[in-house]
Image (tube, rainbow, N blue to C red):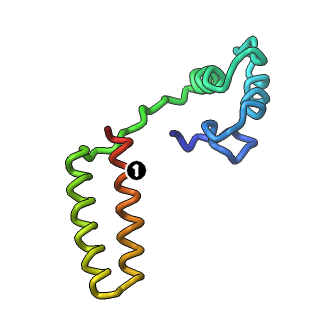
Amino acid sequence: MTEETNEGLKKPLDKMTVKELREVALELPEITGVHGMNKAELLSKIKEIKGIVEEPVQKTSATVSEVKIQIKEFKAKRAAALQEKDAKKAAIYRRRISRLKKKSRKVA
């Protein structure tokens, strides 16, 4: 995602609604058929005309096995925190485990 914003608006193009993108596209004479386009088409045309390069979205660099190893480590730390009756640390580790599980689903 680019942080490129339109001159009059404070939002990045990727965060704009279809209605806002149509308003921007109507100001550009090179684009025709604005009302028949969907959001992806509008974004690509506006970026093409303004010269904004679309950068590919980077996927997470970790592999599933690396994430699962981290989950096991946090589970051990959570068990130790529960043994010590430290509810605050146990809750922190539980949230980290949950986030890592979500990350592993995205990586897969």
Mark 1 residue crowding within 10 angstroms, few (<14) / some (14–19) / many (20+): few
In this rendering, would 74 be left or right of 55? left
Residue at x 70%, y 17% (from the top left corner): 37
Q: Position of residue 30 (x, y in %)?
A: 70, 14
Q: Where is residue 74 in the image (x, y as percent from the top left)?
A: 27, 67
Could you say which is closer to the camera, residue 60 or residue 106? 106
Horizontal side of 36 relative to 50 (left or right) equals right
Residue linked to disc 1 = 102
Observer-nearest of 104 and 85: 85
- Between residue 67 and residue 14, name the one nearer to us: 67
- Farthest residue in the top direction? 32
Q: In which quarter of the image is residue 92?
A: bottom left
Give SS at disc 1: helix
The answer to which image quadrant residue 42 occupies is top right
**Residue at (64%, 41%) from the top-left corner?**
15
Name which residue lies at 78% across and 18% down.
35
Q: Is residue 11 above or below residue 85?
A: above
Residue 54 on image: x %, y %:
48, 30
Quarter of the figure with residue 27: top right
| Residue lying at 60% horizontally and 37% vertically, measured from the top left | 14
Give the answer, above or below, for where 3 lies relative to 46: below
**Three-letter code for the amino acid on which mark 1 is drawn:** Lys
* In the depicted structure, whether residue 78 falls above or below residue 59: below
